[in-house]
Image (tube, helix red, strand yellow):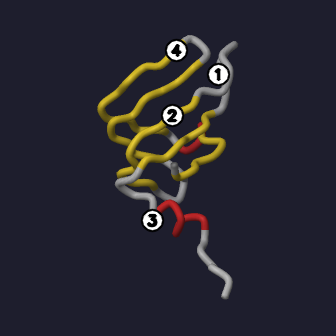
Amino acid sequence: MADNKRPFDVLDGAKQGNVLVKLKAYGRDQEPTVSGELQAFDKHLNIWLENASVKTEDGQTDYGKLFVRGDNVLFVSPE
């Protein structure tokens, strides 16, 4: 039997777990990657993460809590 989950159902099941978020490039930088524990999201793909880190070509920056605006999201994937 096929598993008929919608994309938001998959994200809802990933709450309190780690997710990988790829962001649009800004300036001359490549597309940054954000990872952290998914706390909440909405229909615009605004995302609230805890224990988040942002990886760029220059290195990694760690954050306790991070809000990602949905306009900047290319994709989200449960880890």
Q: Is residue 20 above or below residue 14?
A: above
**Amino acid type assigned to the residue bearing label 1 in the image:** Tyr
In the image, residue 17 lies at what x, y percent? 40, 52
Disc 4 or 2, which lies upstream in sequence? Answer: 2
Residue bearing the label numbered 2: 34
- C-alpha gap between disc 4 and disc 2: 12 Å
Residue bearing the label numbered 4: 59
Q: Are marks 3 and 1 in contact (CB under 8 Å)?
A: no
Disc 1 or 4, which lies upstream in sequence? Answer: 1
In the image, residue 24 lies at what x, y percent? 65, 32
In the image, residue 27 lies at what x, y percent? 66, 16
Disc 4 or 3, which lies upstream in sequence? Answer: 3
Comparing labels 2 and 1, the label whose residue is closer to the camera: 2
**Amino acid type assigned to the residue bearing label 4 in the image:** Gly
- C-alpha gap between disc 2 and disc 1: 14 Å
Residue bearing the label numbered 3: 13
Residue in the picture at 69% in, 13% down: 28
In the image, residue 29 lies at what x, y percent? 66, 16
Comparing labels 1 and 4, the label whose residue is closer to the camera: 4
